Image (cartoon, rainbow, N blue to C red):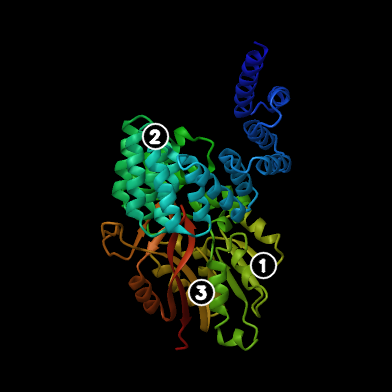
Amino acid sequence: MQRLQSAADLESLTARAAQLVAAGRVGAARPLLAAAKRLDPGSAGLAELSARLALRANTPDLAALELDAAVAADPEHPGLRLRRAELRRHAGDIEGATRDAAEAVVLDRTDPTAKALLGVLLLDLDRTADAVACLAEAVAADPANPGFATGLAAAHEMAGDPDAALAVLLRNIEAAPNLVDQRNAAILLCVRRRDFRRAIRLAEDARQAGIADACCFGLAGHALSSLGQHAEAVDAYAEALKLGPDDPYVRHLVSAAGVVPGAPRAPAEYLRAVFDGYADRFEPHLLSLGYRVPGMFRTALLRHPRIAAGQQVGPVVDLGCGTGLAALAIADLPVGPLIGVDVAPRMLAQAGKKAIYAELHEADAMQFLSGVGAAHYPLIIAADVLCYFGALEDLFSAAHAAMTPGGWLVGSVEELLPDHDGMIPVNANGAWALQRQGRYAHNPTYIRAVAADAGFRLLRLDRETVRWEANAPVPGLLLVLERRHA
């Protein structure tokens, strides 16, 4: 009878401790787990629970000690292997985590969680085919599990099969229709593959199901804006703001949606408001997107004949300098003095902290160039400035007038590309289009024509990835223009 009572006590203590650990109540779980261990000191299950508690208490080293000892005592316990795989992945030991996850799968081939974890780890190791196989088995065992479906979709996409990735997410939506995260993942995938119409349909399905959140409406706004449906995009962004009023990114989207679609440029007042509000987090956010433009500019300028010969080129205008990222990338070259120009005072304040500019001017790009004396600058750089202009005729003409013969204008634009259905949402001349977040994209043919009309010789117009958004490359163009000598 006493033995039965002890078993009941152990089961009750273990169950309650597990509930408390899952709820994050570490202090309350600890004495119950200790009591359970006294009743069954060699239990692999209690060792696993103890490791979970240590992780909840943010003591991963203690969890590792617990699991190492438990695995050594019971090397064929799949749960211990699985838990240690999770711990090792968290610690960045992908190889060790993969070995443990593989052992967990061998020890219990019916556990979809172990197969899913092994698949994700194989994806981390770029073994995409193996990852797809493991994750497919996990999804087959539990079709409604959102984590398994997301992992399999990511594996298919990494393997270069976005159609299969979307099919997985759509099946998961059908199996678990009330999970908005899965719907958002599908919408985001459609946006990445430029299938904007399907993204809009999926967002509308979520809205009708009553589960759309701020992310869902924001993505719908992206898709609508990319198709040139700017009035509808404004409505979608407004709904996103209602659901996420404290989200700074959502607020930016709403502001960007206010740019008039047919306007030839973004208003200076809009740029000042957006970038003043963005100044403190501008650099870390942009760098987190894999921002490549400063490095692209440096590579281009290394081909400048005078710079390559070690001769000084300057003064240099950094048009729309922001916080000074582009100037910082070229500051060790024989260029200067550097003159920073930006419409947002708080961005200029950040640029000033770098101590690389001889002058900083608070001015709109056109305002500054129009006030410059003729033939003054041998080099103007414009990183992510032209994307806030649709029509470039006036800007190129003003830059040409401000430059010395033989001077270089180095800039970047986003490239205007067709959507998934081969359609390009453009104005009547097909030269440029306002896209999401208030930026314009340009047709390469238009760039060539406007540069020639302004009196420039086109030295380079190279397709480049300028950064990544939503894990997708943003297609852009690096342009290098030379003012003709005559």
- Quarter of the view holding residue 183: top left
Sequence-earlier tag: 1 or 3: 1
Q: Nearer the viewer, mark 2 or mark 1?
A: 2
- What amino acid does circle 3 point to? Val
As drawn, the label of residue 62 is: none
Circle number at residue 359: 1
Q: CA distance from mark 2 to mark 1?
A: 48 Å
The image position of residue 60, as x and y in percent, is 70, 42
Q: Residues within 10 Å of mark 1 (few under 14, many from 20)?
A: few
Mark 2 element type = loop
Residue 258 in the image: x percent, y percent?
41, 46
Relative to the observer, which residue lies in front, 465 or 224?
465
User: How far apart are labels 2 and 3 at the CA level?
Assistant: 43 Å
The kind of secondary structure element at disc 1 is: strand
Quadrant of the rendered image containing residue 38: top right
Task: Please report contact status of discs 2 and 3: CB closer than 8 Å, yes or no.
Answer: no
Question: Split into 4 quadrants, where in the image is the N terminus?
Answer: top right
| Disc 1 to disc 3, C-alpha distance | 20 Å
Q: Is residue 399 left or right of residue 230?
A: right
218 in relation to 418, above or below: above
Per the image, the residue denoted by label 3 is: 410
Q: Nearer the viewer, mark 2 or mark 3?
A: 2
Q: Residue at x 44, y 42 (%)?
A: 148
Q: Nearer the viewer, residue 277 or 34?
A: 34
Q: Residue at x 69, y 68 (%)?
A: 356
Q: Which residue is mark 2?
A: 212
Task: Mark 1 and mark 3 in contact? Answer it, CB < 8 Å.
Answer: no
Within 10 angstroms of label 3, few (less than 14), some, or many (20 or more) residues?
A: many
Query: In the picture, residue 59 is in which quadrant?
Result: top right
Q: What residue lies at 57% left-to-right and 68% top-to-bottom? A: 294
Q: SS at mark 3? A: strand
